[in-house]
Image: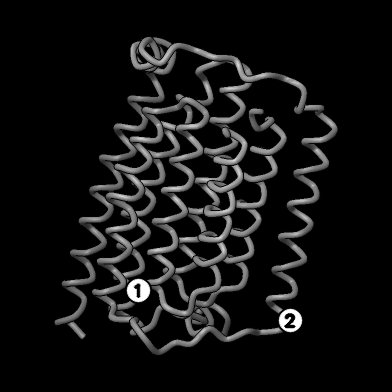
Amino acid sequence: MEHAAFISLSVLTLACALGVVLSKNAVNGAMCLLLCLAGIAGLFVQLHAYLLAFLLVLVYAGAVVALFLFIVMLLDMQGGQPWRFRRLQSLAGFVAAALLITGLNLIAERGRLGDGAPVGHEVGSSLKLYAYQLFTTYLLPVQVMGFLLLISMLGVIVLSRRAAEGEPSK
Amino acid sequence: MTPTLDAYVILSSALFAIGFFGVLVRRNTLVVFMCLELMLVAATLALVAFSRFNGTEDGDIFVFFILTVAAAEVAVGLAIIVALFRTRQTVQVDQLDSLKH
């Protein structure tokens, strides 16, 4: 049962990832990305990471994909721009991706990952554990992340203001 | 029968490779950006699988930070793309070749 769910979720995820890469229209790509993220959230649920599945749907599917769709609509790239298949570049991309996947799988096989059973931790205590770790062991990274978010917010404001001021001076 | 760690690692490396392929092949900057997000998500899947199979929380907590960085990256990257579109009127990678000549 669990295996069937894993197979169907991974097929959904891989098919939607291919849809992101191969779709002609950027809006279709964003929709495929949304479905792919939903499949990954399902896989997170199978791995008993419920909080992360929730956060993934909230942050990625809620905020990031919506932002992508806004920008696609803002730049008005619907239609037009057909997917041009350049033989040399796509061949090089395919070879690079194939090399990458074989290399990663060789590393995975060398390490003999397969024979461990999943170790369970209780769901209820999980949230408490996250909070405890975030505020003790990982306190410095949390603060650095706060600064990163602040700086990126300032950067976005500066970038959009400069673009707005640049236009009348032209 | 539960899926093994191998299955998760193979799935996440396949996702990563698909995203990488998209970054190399696509011409539209926005789609390239979406493929970058795909690669990040593939890495988070591997982290969650490893931390589940090893019984530690560290991978799960690292995914928090990856989510934060991805959100910041998307905000800045899309602002750059919009600024680029305002000045150059295109977001196709092969037309953005000012540094080439």
Q: Quadrant of the N terminus of chain B?
A: top right
Q: Is residue B36 above or below residue A91?
A: above
Residue A32 is left or right of residue B87, and the answer is right
Classify the position of the C terminus of chain B by image quarter.
bottom right
Does A85 appear above or below A17?
below
- Residue B53 occupies quadrant: top right
Residue A88 on image: x %, y %:
73, 81
Where residue B32 appears, as percent x and y from the top left, is 50, 66
- Along the horizontal axis of the image, is A120 left or right of A128? right
Q: Amino acid at mark 2?
A: Leu
Chain letter of the residue carrying label 1: B
Element carrying mark 2: helix
Query: Which quadrant of the view contains residue A52?
Result: top left
Closest to the observer, B21 or A7: A7
Q: Is residue A93 above or below residue A156?
A: below
**Chain letter of disc 2 in the image:** A
Q: What color scheme is it? A: one colour
In front of the other: A133 or A157 = A133
Name the residue located 35 percent from the left edge and 83 percent from the top edge.
Answer: B88
Residue in the picture at 66% in, 84% down: A86
Q: Which mark is residue B14?
A: none
- The answer to whether dots 2 and 1 both sit on one chain is no
Q: Is residue A106 left or right of residue A17?
A: right
Q: How many numbered badges does the structure rendering display?
A: 2
**What residue appears at the point 55 percent right and 51 percent down from the top-left corner?**
B39
| Residue with the mark numbered 2 | A88
Mark 1 sits on what residue? Answer: B84
Q: Amino acid at mark 1?
A: Leu
